[in-house]
Amino acid sequence: MNSDTTDPGGLLAMDSTAGYTDAAEALVEQYESVSFAEVHREVLHLFPTRPAAVLDIGAGSGRDAAALAAAGHRVTAAEPTAAMRELGRARHAHHPIDWVDDALPELPRLTARGERYELILLTAVWMHLDPDQRAAGMAAVARLLADGGRIVLALRHGPVPPGRRMFPVDAPETVALARAHGLAPLHLAHREDPHARAGVSWTYLALHAE
């Protein structure tokens, strides 16, 4: 697809994982420089307190998956970028994490497994999907949610780093997509960027079945 006014910079033509392979080692160090508790401070109270089945979509370095596994949860980490997945697997090899090569919007491997999860995390993931992919992705994620489970999204706002594929995302659109699949907002919070990057901020949105 050529660049035009509806697709600035040819973002739609890029893969959603663009820019992650070459920068994998640096990104792992960046992700691991901030703790799980700090990144998720707005929503920690919504996470299961007893051992639960947890799915981390776009698990990156495995920081969150490792923290959740250490807390006694049964954690599946889905990461489509092979370099990130292998670095995360090696870094957190002492934790019982089930690493899976799978990606939004369809999540075909996870869907084929037929498993459902009590907590699904999408941290710094949603902005990599264009509007059509977000619609398909919400349907896929909703199918993976266990009864009584919760989905927690961290929506990134701000400038797009060079070589990355990102689109504007916001809470109202995400809530509307969720409602179309029987999900309702449970919690909404805004915060600054934990890495203190200029112009970057976050919305944390928790969803549950209506």
Image (spheres, grey):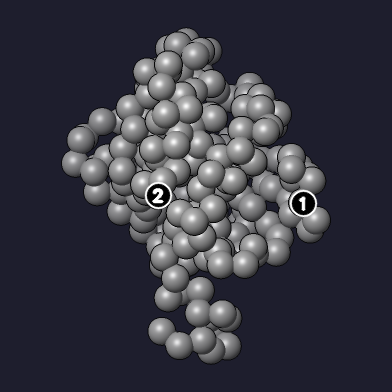
Mark 2 falls on what kind of element? loop
Q: Residue 30 occupies which quadrant of the picture?
A: top right
**In percent of the image, x 41 and y 22: which residue is there?**
93
What amino acid type should be assigned to the residue bearing mark 2? Answer: Thr
Q: Which mark is residue 159?
A: none
Q: Quadrant of the N terminus?
A: bottom left
- Return the mark for residue 81: 2
* SS for dot 1: loop
- Residue 140 place in picture, x, y as percent: 33, 48
For marks 1 and 2, the one nearer the N-term is 2
Q: What is the distance, in whole Å, between disc 1 and disc 2 at their CAs? A: 23 Å
- Is residue 107 something that shows in the picture? yes
In the foreground, 12 or 34: 34
Q: Residue at x 59, y 46 (%)?
A: 26
Residue 75 in sight here: no
The x, y position of residue 49, in whole percent, is 53, 13
Q: Residues within 10 Å of mark 1 (few under 14, many from 20)?
A: few
Q: Could you tell me which residue is drawn at 45 percent across and 88 percent down?
A: 2
Q: Amino acid at mark 1?
A: Arg
Say left or right for 6 vs 132. Answer: right
Q: Which residue is mark 1?
A: 197
Q: Is residue 169 left or right of residue 190?
A: left
Q: As drawn, is 97 to the left or to the right of 168?
A: left
Q: How many marks?
A: 2
Quadrant of the drawing holding the C terminus: top left
**Residue 23 image position (x, y, % from top left):** 54, 53
Q: Are marks 1 and 2 in contact (CB under 8 Å)?
A: no
- Residue located at (64% from left, 52% from top): 156
Q: Position of residue 129 (x, y in %)?
A: 47, 61
Q: Residues within 10 Å of mark 2 (few under 14, many from 20)?
A: many
